[in-house]
Amino acid sequence: EPEVTQTPSHQVTQMGQEVILRCVPISNHLYFYWYRQILGQKVEFLVSFYNNEISEKSEIFDDQFSVERPDGSNFTLKIRSTKLEDSAMYFCASVQDKLNEKLFFGSGTQLSVL
Amino acid sequence: QQQVKQSPQSLIVQKGGIPIINCAYENTAFDYFPWYQQFPGKGPALLIAIRPDVSEKKEGRFTISFNKSAKQFSLHIMDSQPGDSATYFCAATAASGTYKYIFGTGTRLKVLA
């Protein structure tokens, strides 16, 4: 079965540093997402991306966050100046199209901000 | 109105038992209701999903029951096994939107051998 691939699996950074989390969505998918999950809590929506632009974002996704699809395969989440509370597991996900709305998740990047 | 409420928070059953996890929603625009299974350190994996035009869907040992009028849906796991021990999340989304999934708070299931 096709997979959403995320790198790195773990990222440790100092508070105030910039991090970039990388994802390769499933190749024929059109809708892309970032979710996060703080340890032991529910999965929270951050942002959706379609047709090379943000289609929706949550309150969590403030000016410190940005997303980009720099080429035909990669989808990145950048946190410009990390805070302690950004520590979480970040999941990339994708959906194929309007006729097949199954959401496929990657295995996540565990971000630890020290 | 965007919330999906899930219960119970945790559940322990004996092997062979039938754990039931319940979810409720408010937004009538939701029209796709998946359940995800998550093992520690892994991403959520789609287990089974239902649309509101049917009241029940079975896939293997997993069954979703859907009550449109009550805006509730539930997951039943038949003949549960220790390997089913995981966290289960219900979710909801609207096809008319951006497929933003709203997740429940999760149920940690433990199946005793």
Image (spheres, coloured by chain):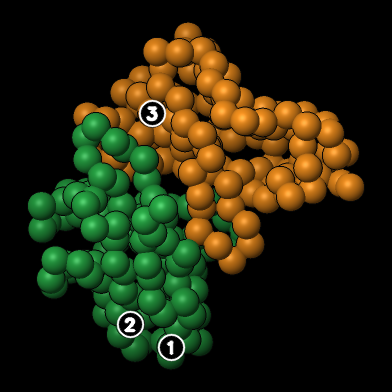
Chain colours: A green, B orange
Q: Which residue is mark 2?
A: A19
Judge whether A51 appears above or below A63 on screen.
above
Disc 3 from disc 1: Cα separation: 38 Å
Q: Local crowd at mark 2 within 10 Å, few (<14), some, or many (≥20)? A: some
Under mark 3, the amino acid is Tyr
Judge whether B92 appears above or below A9 on screen.
above
Q: Say whether residue A57 is visible.
A: no
| Quadrant position of residue A25 | bottom left
Disc 1 from disc 2: Cα separation: 8 Å
Residue A40 vs residue B74, the one in the foreground: B74
Mark 3 vs mark 2: give the one in front. 3
Residue at 57% across / 29% down in the picture? B59
Q: Position of residue A16 (x, y in %)?
A: 35, 87
Report the label total: 3
| Quadrant position of residue A22 | bottom left
Q: Is residue A63 left or right of residue A103?
A: left
Disc 3 sits on a residue from what chain? B
Under mark 1, the amino acid is Thr
